[in-house]
Image (cartoon, helix red, strand yellow):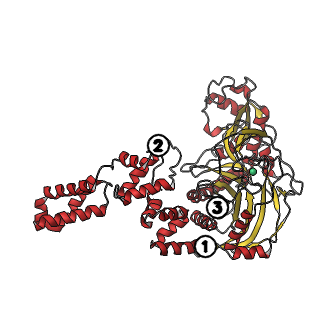
């Protein structure tokens, strides 16, 4: 296999073509709707991906917030390109040794899924031919672009998609690598390195969703498939590995289909509504009433190949269903899963007879109140089934939270670009590049060395801070006077280990102030380092402040005096053991004391108190 990455990083320098802020807002002030259609590109040809999106005929609703403006609503031409955003993209390009273009020409890239009010996304090539080095291997970076982010999808209902304008127009640096990645693990490493380099500019937005990756995967004999919009870096490896497995599966299915002489018939689908009139439950229960039709597509030679083979999660039936769904249907039913859905064995044989199918033949059913939509769905299914006879179709897929992916649309071609005539070309002058070269930011490795030196931390720890995007937070907490070692442990070890709250609520994102209060509790001896995880968990579970969290975690009210009294009690109770075995009694007694203390006092403090008490008893 081989893979390439496209990384999209939001910048925190204001929007790209207006003066609006780049913060997201949950406040909705108004809404308006638009419809979009696919227009031809510069060569007048209509792009296949755009045509596919437009064919869904959806209505798009846009929610505006307190900061929305006419540029975002596409009621006013774009303002001049944000110079700070361009400087940041150029600086990043120089970090990769890329060659900036002589002149920036903003282009319009047709996107008609409603994510842009204009029906296109503005994008500009900034630099070419960069190089990235990760773990001794060089990866090419053919292009670095600056583009505008899309609107944020908030809801989807039948026939309508709702977006919010707050994210639309946030500048994105788009970094594309060459196809030199050869494993899922490598894809993740390259993505992490690009992320660290982007953050080195110190002008990026931070937090979930501010960096998104597209992963292009192709396999020998398969095809390039783009998994678009991965937000969780740790899942990149899984998406890559599962896409490789999916392509291998599809190639095996193809071989079986070809061996059997399978084919997909031309011509309109068959109306079999009358056979389902007596079905009383499931998706077909309304057949023949209120205009609901049932249409069938015979698939000669496909029987048994639509379901998952043993030990695999992939199935051709799901691929076909995804295509039916792309027309707005709920899905489809195929013969490998029947009888089921209220369809009896008898109904299945009647249906087979009607369609003149033999044993090795399969069929697909769809049902809908619109005969046009059901027909379109089966056309798409037939198209996808034909592609199965050839192998792996090139397509764009959506990443799902469980590490699998789902078809979203065909791969776009080159017909979707045309020049943005509202923005004049911007020459990149040598004086501009000289100015940027004279104030280059610290590279991740330089940052690592500096942090390691100035805080006396092990380099592996510092590396984790840099690559997990924790440096800003680390520096701010250390600046507040907290010890670097404690801060690093809290950020790298304790915070990521906080379990997701019950019911899958929002992730725990404590403020720096709250973390400072937790650190202060350790420093003052109110809790031990070992007590931090339960305290964080209590905070994640809704404890209003650190005091309450310590209380809720059962760690309150254990003072140094309480500890000394406990140690005294334990040593006295085991006086015979201490007298006979001396210092060797330390380990078992330490275990006894720690069981009582449980994160309420620091381990070192306990150990010192115990040693002192043992010595006192033996001396006496
Ligand atoms: Zn604006």
Residue in the picture at 51% in, 69% down: 463
- Label 2 or label 1, whichever comes before in sequence order: 1
Label 2 sits on residue: 502
Q: Mark 1 to mark 3: distance in Å?
A: 14 Å
Answer whether labels 1 and 3 touch (C-beta < 8 Å). no
Ligand 1 contact, mark 1 (Cβ < 8 Å): no
Residue in the picture at 67% in, 47% down: 319
- Counting labels gives 3
Residue in the picture at 47% in, 43% down: 502
Q: Quadrant of the C terminus?
A: bottom left
Instruction: Please indicate whether residue 362 sits to the left or right of residue 46 in the image.
Output: left
Query: What numbered label is drawn on residue 442?
Result: 1
- Label 1 or label 3, whichever comes before in sequence order: 3
Q: Position of residue 159 (x, y in %)?
A: 73, 36
Label 1: which secondary element? loop
Where is residue 243, by image quadrant?
Answer: bottom right
Q: Quadrant of the N terminus?
A: bottom right
Label 2: which secondary element? loop
Q: Depth check: 171 or 333 in front?
A: 171
Residue in the picture at 53% in, 72% down: 448
Residue closest to the far front? 480
Can residue 263 be seen?
Answer: no
Instruction: Please indicate whether residue 358 sits to the left or right of residue 400 in the image.
Output: right
Q: Position of residue 434 (x, y in %)?
A: 74, 77
Where is residue 13, by image quadrant?
Answer: bottom right
Using the image, determine if residue 458 lies above or below residue 563. below
Label 3 sits on residue: 204
> Which is in the foreground here, disc 2 or disc 1?
1
Label 3: which secondary element? loop
> Which is in the foreground here, disc 3 or disc 2?
3
């Amino acid at each position: 296999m081989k893979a390439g990455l496209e990384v999209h990083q939001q910048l925190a320098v204001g929007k790209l073509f207006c003066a609006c802020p780049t913060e997201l807002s949950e406040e909705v002030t108004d809404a308006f709707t638009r419809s979009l259609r696919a227009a031809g590109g510069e060569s007048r040809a209509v792009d296949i991906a755009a045509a596919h999106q437009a064919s869904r005929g959806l209505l798009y609703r846009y929610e505006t917030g307190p900061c929305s403006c006419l540029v975002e609503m596409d009621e006013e031409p774009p303002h001049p390109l944000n110079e700070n955003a361009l400087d940041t993209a150029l600086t990043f390009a120089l970090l990769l040794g890329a060659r900036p273009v002589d002149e920036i020409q903003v282009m319009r890239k047709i996107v008609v899924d409603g994510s842009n009010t204009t029906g296109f996304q503005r994008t500009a090539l900034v630099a070419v031919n960069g190089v990235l080095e990760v773990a001794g291997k060089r990866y090419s970076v053919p292009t670095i672009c600056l583009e505008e982010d899309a609107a944020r999808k908030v809801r989807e209902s039948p026939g309508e998609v709702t977006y919010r304008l707050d994210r639309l127009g946030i500048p994105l640096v788009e970094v594309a690598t060459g196809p030199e990645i050869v494993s899922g693990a490598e894809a993740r490493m390259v993505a992490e390195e690009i992320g660290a380099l982007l953050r080195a500019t110190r002008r990026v937005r931070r937090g979930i969703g501010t960096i998104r990756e597209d992963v292009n995967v192709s396999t020998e004999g398969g095809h390039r498939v783009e998994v678009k919009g991965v937000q969780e870096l740790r899942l990149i490896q899984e998406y890559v590995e599962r896409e490789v497995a999916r392509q291998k599966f599809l190639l095996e299915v193809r071989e079986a289909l070809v061996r059997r002489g399978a084919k997909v018939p031309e011509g309109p689908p068959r109306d079999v509504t009358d056979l389902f009139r007596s079905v009383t439950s499931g998706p077909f229960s309304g057949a023949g009433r209120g205009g609901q039709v049932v249409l069938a597509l015979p698939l000669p030679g496909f029987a048994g190949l639509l379901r998952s083979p043993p030990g695999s999660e992939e199935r051709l039936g799901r691929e076909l269903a995804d295509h039916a769904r792309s027309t707005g249907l709920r899905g489809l039913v195929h013969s490998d899963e029947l009888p089921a859905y209220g369809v009896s064995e008898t109904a299945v044989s009647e249906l087979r007879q009607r369609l003149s199918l033999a044993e090795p033949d399969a069929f697909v059913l769809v049902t809908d109140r619109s005969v046009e939509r059901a027909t379109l769905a089966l056309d798409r299914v037939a198209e996808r089934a034909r592609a199965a006879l050839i192998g792996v179709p090139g397509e764009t897929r959506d990443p799902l939270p469980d590490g699998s992916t789902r078809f979203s649309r065909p791969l776009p071609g080159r017909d979707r670009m045309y020049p943005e005539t509202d923005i004049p070309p911007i020459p990149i002058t040598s004086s501009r590049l000289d100015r940027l070269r004279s104030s280059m930011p610290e590279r991740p490795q330089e940052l690592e060395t500096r942090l390691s030196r100035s805080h006396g931390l092990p380099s592996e720890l510092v590396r984790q801070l840099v690559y997990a995007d924790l440096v800003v937070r680390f520096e701010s907490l250390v600046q507040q006077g907290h010890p670097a070692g404690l801060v690093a442990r809290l950020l790298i070890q304790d915070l990521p280990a906080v379990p997701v709250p019950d019911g899958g609520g929002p992730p725990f994102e404590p403020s720096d102030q709250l973390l400072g209060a937790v650190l202060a509790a350790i420093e003052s001896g109110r809790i031990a380092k070992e007590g931090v995880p339960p305290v964080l968990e209590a905070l994640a579970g809704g404890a209003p402040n650190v005091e309450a969290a310590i209380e809720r975690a059962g760690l309150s009210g254990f003072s140094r005096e309480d500890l000394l009294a406990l140690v005294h009690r334990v040593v006295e109770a085991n006086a015979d053991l201490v007298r006979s075995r001396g210092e060797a009694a330390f380990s078992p007694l330490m275990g006894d004391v720690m069981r009582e203390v449980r994160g309420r006092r620091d381990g070192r403090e306990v150990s010192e108190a115990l040693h002192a008490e043992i010595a006192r008893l033996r001396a006496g």
